[in-house]
C-alpha cells in the first residue's frame, strides 16, 4: 500500500511537490492542478521528479457530471473526462477517477430517482466505453468512485457495471465509507469489507481512506465524516484486505480541513496497517513476512 493525502503545498515546482510527500511519508499523490498536456516539458520534469523520489500518482481526478441531463453539458463533461484520462495515461497514474454523475441539476453528485434506472446504467456503460475506446489507455485505468446516490453503491453493482463495460482499461476506485447506506451495513462493516474485496479485489486500482459515524440525534439515518480512527469503520479489517492487493496500490486520505488533521489521520492509518501485519518499507507498506 502507498499511503497518500494532502500535503498543503501550493507551489508549482515538481521537486518541491515530491519532497513534500516524502516528508509526510507518503508514497502516493493526487495529480496537482497545474499539470496540463499542453505543457509537455513540465510534464516530463514532473514525472522525473516523482520517479526520483519514489512517489506515484494515485489519481487524476475529474469530478464532474458526465451523465448530466442537459446534453450539451454532458458532452462538455465527457470531453473533460477524456482529456483527464489522457493526462493520467501520460503520467502513468493508477487511475483517472470520476463519479458516474446524476440526473439532477442542483449538484453534480446528488440524489435523483433516475440514477437507479436502466437508462442511467446503459448510458453510464456507453460513456465509459466511448471514453476508453477514444483514449485507448494502456498504463492507467478509468474508474468511477462508489457513491451513495446512484446504482454504483455495492460491489455487486460495480461488478455488473464492469462486466457490461467489458474493457480491460476499466478499474475500481474503492471508498468503503461511500457504501455505508444503512445502520445494518455500518455496524457489520467488517464483513461487508471482506465481501467487497472478495468480489472486486483484483480490479481495485485505488482507494480513498476516511471514517464515518452515525449521527445519534438524527431521527432518520444520517452519517457524518469524522477523523480517521474516531468513527465506526473497521480499518484493521480494511488494511488486512488492502495488504492482499499489489504493494503499489494507492490509498488516499481525504476530506480533512487542516494539515494537523491529515497528520493525525496518517498516523492512525499507519497504526491500523501495523495491526494488520504491514510494515513500512521506504514509502511502501508491505505485508511483513514471517521468518521460518
Image (tube, rainbow, N blue to C red):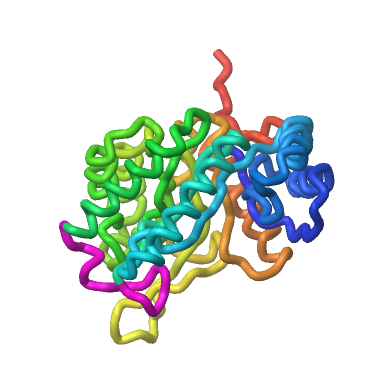
Q: Which residues are magenta?
A: 104-118
In terms of depth relative to the viewer, which is nearer, 267 or 132?
A: 132
In terms of depth relative to the viewer, which is nearer, 156 or 117?
A: 117
Q: Is residue 107 left or right of residue 279?
A: left
Q: Please give the name of the residue rendered at 26% of the width and 45% of the height, measured from the top-left corner.
A: 161
Residue 114 appears in view: yes
Q: Single out the residue that lies furthest toward the top.
A: 292
Give the image quarter of residue 194: top left
Q: Position of residue 21 (x, y in %)?
A: 74, 47
Q: Single out the residue that lies furthest toward the front.
A: 72
Q: Position of residue 228 (x, y in %)?
A: 55, 61
In terms of depth relative to the viewer, which is nearer, 80 or 196?
A: 80
Q: Position of residue 126 (x, y in %)?
A: 28, 47
Instruction: Decide whether residue 63 is among the magenta residues.
Output: no
Look at the image and tell me in which quarter the N terminus lies: top right
Q: Kindly report the secondary structure that dominates the magenta region of the rendered protein.
A: loop
Q: Please give the name of the residue rendered at 33% of the width and 70% of the height, measured from the top-left corner.
A: 70
Q: Please give the name of the residue rendered at 48% of the width and 65% of the height, measured from the top-left corner.
A: 231
Q: Is residue 223 above or below residue 209?
A: below
Look at the image and tell me in which quarter the C terminus lies: top right
Q: Is residue 217 left or right of residue 121?
A: right
Q: Please give the name of the residue rendered at 33% of the width and 61% of the height, measured from the top-left corner.
A: 67
Q: Is residue 10 above or below residue 136?
A: below
Residue 241 appears in view: no
Q: Position of residue 7 (x, y in %)?
A: 73, 56
How many marks overall? 0
Amino acid at each position: 500500500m502507498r499511503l497518500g493525502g494532502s500535503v498543503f503545498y501550493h507551489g508549482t515546482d515538481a521537486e518541491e511537490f515530491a519532497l513534500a510527500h516524502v516528508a509526510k511519508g507518503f508514497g502516493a499523490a493526487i495529480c496537482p492542478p497545474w499539470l496540463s498536456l499542453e505543457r509537455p516539458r513540465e510534464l516530463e520534469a514532473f514525472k522525473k521528479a516523482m520517479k526520483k523520489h519514489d512517489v506515484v500518482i494515485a489519481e487524476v481526478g475529474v469530478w464532474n457530471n458526465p451523465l448530466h441531463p442537459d446534453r450539451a453539458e454532458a458532452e462538455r463533461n465527457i470531453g473533460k473526462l477524456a482529456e483527464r484520462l489522457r493526462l493520467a495515461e501520460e503520467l502513468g497514474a493508477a487511475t483517472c477517477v470520476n463519479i458516474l454523475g446524476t440526473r439532477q441539476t442542483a449538484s453534480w453528485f446528488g440524489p435523483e430517482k433516475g440514477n437507479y434506472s436502466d437508462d442511467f446504467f446503459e448510458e453510464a456503460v456507453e460513456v465509459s466505453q466511448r471514453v476508453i475506446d477514444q483514449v485507448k489507455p494502456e498504463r492507467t485505468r478509468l474508474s468511477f468512485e462508489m457513491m451513495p446516490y446512484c446504482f454504483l453503491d455495492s460491489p455487486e453493482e460495480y461488478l455488473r457495471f464492469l462486466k457490461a463495460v467489458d474493457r480491460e482499461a476499466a478499474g475500481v476506485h474503492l471508498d468503503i465509507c461511500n457504501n455505508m447506506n444503512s445502520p445494518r451495513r455500518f455496524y457489520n462493516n467488517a464483513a461487508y469489507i471482506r465481501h467487497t474485496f472478495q468480489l472486486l479485489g483484483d480490479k481495485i486500482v485505488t482507494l480513498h481512506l476516511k471514517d464515518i459515524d452515525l449521527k445519534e440525534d438524527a431521527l432518520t439515518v444520517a452519517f457524518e465524516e469524522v477523523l480517521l480512527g474516531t468513527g465506526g469503520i473497521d480499518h484493521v479489517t480494511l488494511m488486512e484486505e488492502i495488504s492482499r492487493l499489489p504493494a503499489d496500490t494507492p490509498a488516499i486520505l481525504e476530506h480533512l480541513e487542516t494539515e494537523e488533521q491529515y497528520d493525525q489521520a496518517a498516523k492512525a492509518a499507519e497504526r491500523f496497517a501495523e495491526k494488520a501485519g504491514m510494515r513500512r518499507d521506504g514509502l511502501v507498506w508491505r505485508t511483513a513476512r514471517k521468518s521460518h
